[in-house]
Image (spheres, grey):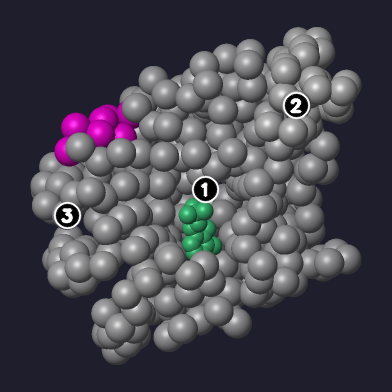
């Protein structure tokens, strides 16, 4: 698929260029004109791009564009990246900062919401912009680098707060930073003795797998234990290129977990979700989180009911490998943090017995006297 796409739209491009992440970035599709050369757009997509007054810029790497259907506006990957006019609408309950992150900013770009862990927003730039981004308010604008002074203030805060044992580096996408910057930041974090757990949240192995070079893997490897949370939403994202990129990370000893946003029209069926989770396991990625869509402004077209999410979890739990079942998480507005949603398995009590529902919906009794 990718080969044919290249022949049609980037005929002069050499293998070396295509496989070079900086070439992919330089040749990102960022406007209507270049998008129209490749895709046959719906009127609505065209209108949205013409009036792109939204908060979030538009960008797709040539590689990721090659995975999309050029003729079908409902293609699951396409709807995650190509804007439509519904993005300009705002629905009940939707907000610009639904997670209340701005209220928990300890320093610019450092969110300290949970006592023992902090979220380090290292950059505002991504390889491509997901239309359901919950940080649309702060990413993509002019793609300016985060000033070093923000990093310095965040590091100073982390040094002072020895209750923080876990730092999640996110953004934007931290792996959009150059090797030297990543090396520098991880080095500084590792100098802080009370930080025992570091993870990087990224979609780069999926949208720009060329970025996961052997050199990058060698840098990351120096800072173990370092974990990766990869953002993946659909089985068709797990191409041979993505598999190779995830393999380089896994071979460097990095435990990889997944984060998936539950998205209408993309992955909101048990069949697609199961296929995705199975493919992740095959790629040595442990399914970690399935996120209920945040109440982010302009993204209501992606939102499913919570019943749908619980149904998907029920369709996995007990029906397939336990490792293939992610936690279903919702982060309700108000800044209170994440809440796990679980299908009810404790269905009642009969005297000293608790009644449990199994994956086949059959009821089993377990002796559990209240006096014990
Ligand atoms: C999600 C999140 C974390 C990490 O939470 P885990 O449950 O450990 O994955 C940390 N800080 C903030 C602000 C978050 O939103």
Q: Distance between the residues labelled 2 and 3?
A: 48 Å
Q: Residue 37 carries which label?
A: 1
Query: Which quadrant of the structure image shows residue 74?
Result: top right
> Where is residue 11 shown, x and y percent of the image?
32, 38
- In magenta, the rendered stretch is 243-252
Q: Which mark is residue 314?
A: none
Q: What kind of element bears circle 1? A: helix
Q: Is residue 81 visible?
A: yes
Q: Which residue is drawn at 56% across and 28% down?
A: 325
> Where is residue 91 shown, x and y percent of the image?
85, 64
Q: Check if mark 2's residue and mark 3's residue have beta carbons within 8 Å.
A: no
Categorize mark 3 by other alpha carbons within 10 Å: few (<14), some (14-19), many (20+).
some
Q: Check residue 247 for magenta coloring.
A: yes
Q: Residue at x 61, y 52 (%)?
A: 82
Categorize mark 2 by other alpha carbons within 10 Å: few (<14), some (14-19), many (20+).
few
Marked residue nearer the N-terminal end (3 or 1):
1
Q: In this view, does 218 lie above or below 368?
A: below
Q: Check if mark 1's residue and mark 2's residue have beta carbons within 8 Å.
A: no
Between tags 3 and 1, which lies in front?
A: 3
**Residue at disc 2, CB closer than 8 Å to ligand 1:** no
Q: Which residue is drawn at 47% across and 45% down?
A: 231
Q: Is residue 129 above or below residue 215?
A: below
Q: Residue 223 carries which label?
A: 3
Q: Name the residue under label 2.
A: 369
Q: Distance between the residues labelled 1 and 2?
A: 69 Å
Q: Check residue 317 for magenta coloring.
A: no
Query: Which quadrant of the structure image shows residue 268?
Result: top right
């Amino acid at each position: 698929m990718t080969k044919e796409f290249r022949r049609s739209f980037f005929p002069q491009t050499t293998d070396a260029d295509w496989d070079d992440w900086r070439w992919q970035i330089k040749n990102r599709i960022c406007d209507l004109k270049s998008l129209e050369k490749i895709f046959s757009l719906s009127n609505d997509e065209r209108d949205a791009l013409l009036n792109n007054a939204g908060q979030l810029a538009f960008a797709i790497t040539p590689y990721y564009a090659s995975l999309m259907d050029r003729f079908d506006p409902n293609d699951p990957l396409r709807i995650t990246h190509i804007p439509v006019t519904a993005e300009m609408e705002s629905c009940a309950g939707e907000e610009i900062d639904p997670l209340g992150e701005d209220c928990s900013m300890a320093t610019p770009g450092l969110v300290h919401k949970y006592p023992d862990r902090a979220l380090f927003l290292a950059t505002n730039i991504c390889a491509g912009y997901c239309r359901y981004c919950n940080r649309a308010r702060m990413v993509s604008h002019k793609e300016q680098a985060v000033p070093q002074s923000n990093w310095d203030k965040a590091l100073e805060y982390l040094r002072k707060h020895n209750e923080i044992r876990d730092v999640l580096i996110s953004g934007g996408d931290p792996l959009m930073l150059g090797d030297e910057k990543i090396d520098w930041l991880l080095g500084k974090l590792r100098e802080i003795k009370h930080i025992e757990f570091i993870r990087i949240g990224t979609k780069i192995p999926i949208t720009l797998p060329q970025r996961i070079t052997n050199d990058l893997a060698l840098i990351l490897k120096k800072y173990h234990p370092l974990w990766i949370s990869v953002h993946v939403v659909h089985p068709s994202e797990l191409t041979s290129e993505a598999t190779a990129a995830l393999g380089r990370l896994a071979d460097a000893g990095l435990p990889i977990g997944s984060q998936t946003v539950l998205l209408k029209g993309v992955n909101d069926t048990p069949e697609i979700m199961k296929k995705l989770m199975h493919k992740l396991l095959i790629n040595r990625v442990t399914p970690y989180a399935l996120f209920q869509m945040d109440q982010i402004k302009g993204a209501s077209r992606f939102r499913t009911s919570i019943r749908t999410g619980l149904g998907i979890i029920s369709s996995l739990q007990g029906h397939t490998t336990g490792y293939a079942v992610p936690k279903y998480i919702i982060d309700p507005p108000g800044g209170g943090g994440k809440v796990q949603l679980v299908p009810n398995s404790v269905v009642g009590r009969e005297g000293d017995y608790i009644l449990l529902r199994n994956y086949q919906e059959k009821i089993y009794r377990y002796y559990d006297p209240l006096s014990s």
